[in-house]
Protein backbone atom coordinates (compact mmCIF):
# COMPACT_ATOMS: atom_id res chain seq x y z
CA UNK A 1 0.00 0.00 0.00
CA UNK A 2 1.37 3.41 -0.96
CA UNK A 3 -0.20 6.83 -1.21
CA UNK A 4 0.10 9.98 -3.26
CA UNK A 5 1.35 12.87 -1.17
CA UNK A 6 0.16 16.25 -2.39
CA UNK A 7 2.19 19.35 -1.64
CA UNK A 8 1.53 22.77 -0.20
CA UNK A 9 3.73 25.73 -1.02
CA UNK A 10 5.69 27.79 1.45
CA UNK A 11 5.57 31.54 0.84
CA UNK A 12 8.80 31.29 -1.19
CA UNK A 13 7.26 28.72 -3.55
CA UNK A 14 9.04 25.62 -2.21
CA UNK A 15 6.73 22.61 -2.27
CA UNK A 16 6.28 20.84 1.05
CA UNK A 17 4.76 17.35 1.07
CA UNK A 18 1.46 17.84 2.87
CA UNK A 19 1.64 14.59 4.78
CA UNK A 20 4.71 14.29 6.96
CA UNK A 21 5.83 11.67 9.43
CA UNK A 22 6.63 13.14 12.85
CA UNK A 23 9.15 11.25 14.95
CA UNK A 24 8.42 12.86 18.32
CA UNK A 25 8.54 10.36 21.22
CA UNK A 26 9.76 7.44 19.10
CA UNK A 27 12.83 6.63 21.18
CA UNK A 28 13.22 2.84 21.23
CA UNK A 29 15.74 2.01 18.53
CA UNK A 30 14.09 -1.09 17.06
CA UNK A 31 10.64 0.54 17.04
CA UNK A 32 12.12 3.61 15.39
CA UNK A 33 13.85 1.56 12.67
CA UNK A 34 10.66 -0.38 11.91
CA UNK A 35 8.45 2.71 11.92
CA UNK A 36 10.70 4.73 9.62
CA UNK A 37 11.51 1.92 7.20
CA UNK A 38 7.79 1.10 6.91
CA UNK A 39 6.90 4.78 6.48
CA UNK A 40 9.42 5.06 3.65
CA UNK A 41 8.17 1.82 2.09
CA UNK A 42 4.58 3.08 1.90
CA UNK A 43 5.56 6.45 0.50
CA UNK A 44 6.34 8.94 3.24
CA UNK A 45 9.06 11.35 2.14
CA UNK A 46 8.54 14.24 4.57
CA UNK A 47 10.01 13.60 8.00
CA UNK A 48 9.72 16.02 10.92
CA UNK A 49 12.27 15.85 13.73
CA UNK A 50 14.00 18.16 16.19
CA UNK A 51 17.15 18.16 18.28
CA UNK A 52 15.07 17.89 21.45
CA UNK A 53 13.50 14.63 20.18
CA UNK A 54 16.88 12.90 20.43
CA UNK A 55 16.44 10.84 17.27
CA UNK A 56 17.94 12.90 14.42
CA UNK A 57 20.85 10.47 14.07
CA UNK A 58 18.54 7.45 13.87
CA UNK A 59 16.41 9.18 11.25
CA UNK A 60 19.49 9.97 9.16
CA UNK A 61 20.56 6.34 9.36
CA UNK A 62 17.16 5.06 8.21
CA UNK A 63 16.99 7.53 5.33
CA UNK A 64 20.42 6.41 4.15
CA UNK A 65 19.45 2.74 4.50
CA UNK A 66 16.47 3.34 2.20
CA UNK A 67 18.80 3.66 -0.79
CA UNK A 68 16.74 6.59 -2.10
CA UNK A 69 18.58 9.78 -3.05
CA UNK A 70 18.65 12.64 -0.53
CA UNK A 71 16.60 14.78 -2.92
CA UNK A 72 13.70 12.31 -2.61
CA UNK A 73 13.15 13.43 0.98
CA UNK A 74 11.87 16.59 2.60
CA UNK A 75 13.51 16.84 6.02
CA UNK A 76 12.32 19.28 8.67
CA UNK A 77 14.07 19.95 11.96
CA UNK A 78 13.85 22.60 14.64
CA UNK A 79 16.28 24.62 16.72
CA UNK A 80 15.62 24.21 20.45
CA UNK A 81 15.29 27.02 23.01
CA UNK A 82 18.74 26.42 24.54
CA UNK A 83 20.34 26.89 21.10
CA UNK A 84 18.79 30.25 20.25
CA UNK A 85 21.21 33.05 19.41
CA UNK A 86 23.26 33.74 16.29
CA UNK A 87 26.32 31.53 16.88
CA UNK A 88 24.39 28.93 18.90
CA UNK A 89 21.78 28.47 16.18
CA UNK A 90 24.41 28.06 13.47
CA UNK A 91 26.20 25.48 15.61
CA UNK A 92 22.95 23.63 16.34
CA UNK A 93 22.12 23.62 12.62
CA UNK A 94 25.51 22.09 11.76
CA UNK A 95 25.09 19.45 14.48
CA UNK A 96 21.63 18.58 13.16
CA UNK A 97 22.95 18.20 9.61
CA UNK A 98 25.82 16.04 10.85
CA UNK A 99 23.45 13.78 12.80
CA UNK A 100 21.09 13.49 9.84
CA UNK A 101 24.04 12.98 7.45
CA UNK A 102 22.82 15.74 5.11
CA UNK A 103 24.35 18.88 3.61
CA UNK A 104 21.16 20.93 3.84
CA UNK A 105 17.72 20.92 5.42
CA UNK A 106 14.52 21.37 3.51
CA UNK A 107 12.93 23.22 6.41
CA UNK A 108 14.33 24.56 9.67
CA UNK A 109 12.10 26.12 12.29
CA UNK A 110 12.51 27.97 15.56
CA UNK A 111 10.72 25.58 17.90
CA UNK A 112 9.45 28.21 20.37
CA UNK A 113 9.71 31.98 20.82
CA UNK A 114 12.22 31.77 23.66
CA UNK A 115 14.87 34.39 24.51
CA UNK A 116 17.29 35.20 21.66
CA UNK A 117 14.92 34.12 18.89
CA UNK A 118 15.67 37.29 16.90
CA UNK A 119 19.38 36.42 16.79
CA UNK A 120 18.47 32.84 15.89
CA UNK A 121 16.37 34.19 13.03
CA UNK A 122 19.33 36.20 11.71
CA UNK A 123 21.40 33.00 11.64
CA UNK A 124 18.61 31.18 9.81
CA UNK A 125 18.32 34.00 7.27
CA UNK A 126 22.04 33.67 6.60
CA UNK A 127 21.86 29.88 6.25
CA UNK A 128 18.89 30.29 3.90
CA UNK A 129 20.75 32.89 1.82
CA UNK A 130 23.66 30.50 1.20
CA UNK A 131 21.37 27.58 0.29
CA UNK A 132 21.74 25.50 3.46
CA UNK A 133 18.00 25.69 4.20
CA UNK A 134 15.20 25.77 1.61
CA UNK A 135 12.41 27.01 3.92
CA UNK A 136 12.80 28.93 7.18
CA UNK A 137 9.98 29.40 9.62
CA UNK A 138 8.65 29.21 13.14
CA UNK A 139 6.55 26.88 15.28
CA UNK A 140 4.52 27.57 18.39
CA UNK A 141 4.76 31.35 17.99
CA UNK A 142 1.95 33.59 19.16
CA UNK A 143 0.86 36.62 17.16
CA UNK A 144 2.94 39.06 19.23
CA UNK A 145 6.08 36.98 18.58
CA UNK A 146 5.38 36.92 14.84
CA UNK A 147 4.73 40.66 14.78
CA UNK A 148 7.96 41.35 16.68
CA UNK A 149 9.93 39.05 14.37
CA UNK A 150 8.44 40.69 11.28
CA UNK A 151 9.64 44.11 12.49
CA UNK A 152 13.23 42.86 12.64
CA UNK A 153 13.45 40.21 9.92
CA UNK A 154 15.09 40.77 6.56
CA UNK A 155 13.37 37.62 5.26
CA UNK A 156 9.88 37.01 6.67
CA UNK A 157 9.02 33.55 8.00
CA UNK A 158 7.95 31.32 5.13
CA UNK A 159 5.80 29.10 7.31
CA UNK A 160 4.26 29.12 10.76
Image (cartoon, grey):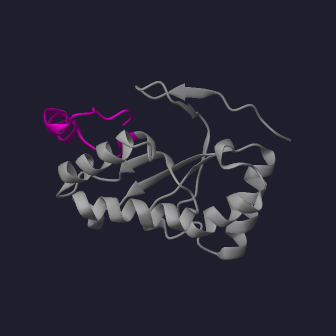
Residue 104 can be seen in this image: yes
Question: Is residue 92 depicted above or below 20 in this figure?
Answer: below
Tell me which residue sits at (77%, 35%) in the image. Answer: 3
In percent of width and height, residue 15 lies at 55, 29
Q: Nearer the viewer, residue 95 or 9?
A: 95
Task: Give the quadrant of the N terminus.
Answer: top right
Q: Nearer the viewer, residue 103 or 54?
A: 103
Looking at this view, name the residue that lies furthest to the front.
Answer: 130
In percent of width and height, residue 132 lies at 44, 47
Numbered label tally: 0
Picture quadrant where residue 154 is located: top left
Question: Is residue 114 depicted above or below 13 in this figure?
Answer: below
Question: Is residue 157 depicted above or below 49 in this figure?
Answer: above
In percent of width and height, residue 81 lies at 28, 62
Tell me which residue sits at (58%, 63%) in the image. Answer: 101
Picture quadrant where residue 138 is located: top left
Tell me which residue sits at (56%, 62%) in the image. Answer: 100
Task: Give the quadrant of the C terminus.
Answer: top left
- The reply, left or right, for residue 20 in relation to residue 149 is right
Residue 140 can be seen in this image: no
Residue 159 falls within the magenta-colored stretch: yes
- The reply, left or right, for residue 136 in relation to residue 147 is right
Looking at this view, name the residue that lies furthest to the right.
Answer: 1
> Which stretch is magenta?
136-160
- The reply, left or right, for residue 82 in relation to residue 25 is left
Residue 146 falls within the magenta-colored stretch: yes
- The reply, left or right, for residue 136 in relation to residue 31 is left
Amino acid sequence: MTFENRAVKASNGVEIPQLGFGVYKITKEREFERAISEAIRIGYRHFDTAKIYGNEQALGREIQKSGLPREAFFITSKVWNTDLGFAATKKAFEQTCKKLKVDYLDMYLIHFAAPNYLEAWRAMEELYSVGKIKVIGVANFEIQHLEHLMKHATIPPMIN
